Image (cartoon, rainbow, N blue to C red):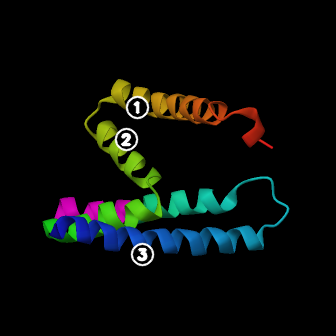
């Protein structure tokens, strides 16, 4: 139960931070066609994930509870793209190039197909 609370609290913090930061970018880039807010959140989340992962792996800096709170909670609430990036990074570090490539391609293609399928499943009268 303690683990769930750590993740829930961290997730709330990360989600609010994502909401505020992407909202700020949206306000500052009105009229842009490029989704800079989401892009910035994803890149910043990956950078923060890299710093934290470096501290965790190289320095054994965080307890198990702190890792749940920071990685799964705050960063996971901020952006799950950072988890995708970290997993891909670890695959590449282990020289599992084909697995990493497959993971990237399948994640993108299957994610977009799943989004299309879910969107298409809604009857037309709701798509107005």
Q: CA distance from mark 2 to mark 1?
A: 7 Å
Residue 12 quadrant: bottom left
Residue 20 location, quadrant: bottom right
**Residues under labels 3 and 2: Cα distance?**
25 Å
Which residue is labeled 2 in the image? 88
Disc 1 on helix, strand or loop? helix
Which residue is located at x 32 percent, y 68 percent?
A: 8
Q: Secondary structure at mark 3?
A: helix
Q: Which residue is the site of mark 3?
A: 13
Q: Nearer the viewer, residue 108 or 54?
A: 108
Where residue 103 is drawn, which disc sits there?
1
Report the number of discs.
Answer: 3
Work out which residue is located at the far right of the displayed protein and give it.
31
Q: Which of the two discs, 3 and 1, labels the residue nearer the N terminus?
A: 3
Find the magenta span and give its range: 49-62
> How far across and how far down the image is residue 110, in percent?
51, 29
- Neighbor class of circle 1 (other Cα within 10 Å; few <14, some 14-19, many 20+) is some
Q: Check contact, mark 3 vs mark 1: CB within 8 A.
A: no
Q: Kindly indicate whether the residue at mark 1 contacts the one at mark 2 (C-beta within 8 angstroms).
A: yes
Q: Position of residue 64 (x, y in %)?
A: 14, 65
Q: Is residue 28 left or right of residue 42?
A: right
Percent position (x, y) of residue 39?
61, 56
Tag 2: Cα neighbours inside 10 Å, few (<14), some, or many (≥20)?
Answer: many
In this orientation, does residue 55 appear? no
**Residue 58 image point, x, y percent:** 19, 61
Name the element at disc 2.
helix
Q: CA distance from mark 3 to mark 1?
A: 28 Å
Residue at point 28% right, 60% down?
Answer: 53
79 drawn magenta: no
Residue drawn at (76%, 73%) of the image: 28
């Amino acid at each position: 139960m303690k683990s769930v609370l750590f993740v829930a609290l961290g997730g709330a913090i990360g989600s609010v931070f994502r909401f505020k930061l992407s909202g700020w970018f949206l306000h500052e880039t009105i009229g842009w066609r490029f989704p800079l807010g989401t892009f910035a959140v994803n890149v910043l989340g990956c950078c923060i994930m890299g710093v934290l992962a470096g501290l965790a792996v190289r320095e054994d800096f965080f307890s198990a509870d702190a890792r749940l709170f920071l990685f799964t909670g705050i960063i996971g609430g901020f952006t799950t793209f950072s988890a995708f990036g970290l997993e891909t990074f670890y695959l590449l570090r282990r020289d599992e190039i084909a697995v990493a490539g497959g993971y990237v391609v399948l994640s993108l293609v299957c994610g977009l197909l799943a989004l299309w399928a879910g969107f298409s499943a809604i009857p037309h009268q709701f798509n107005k």
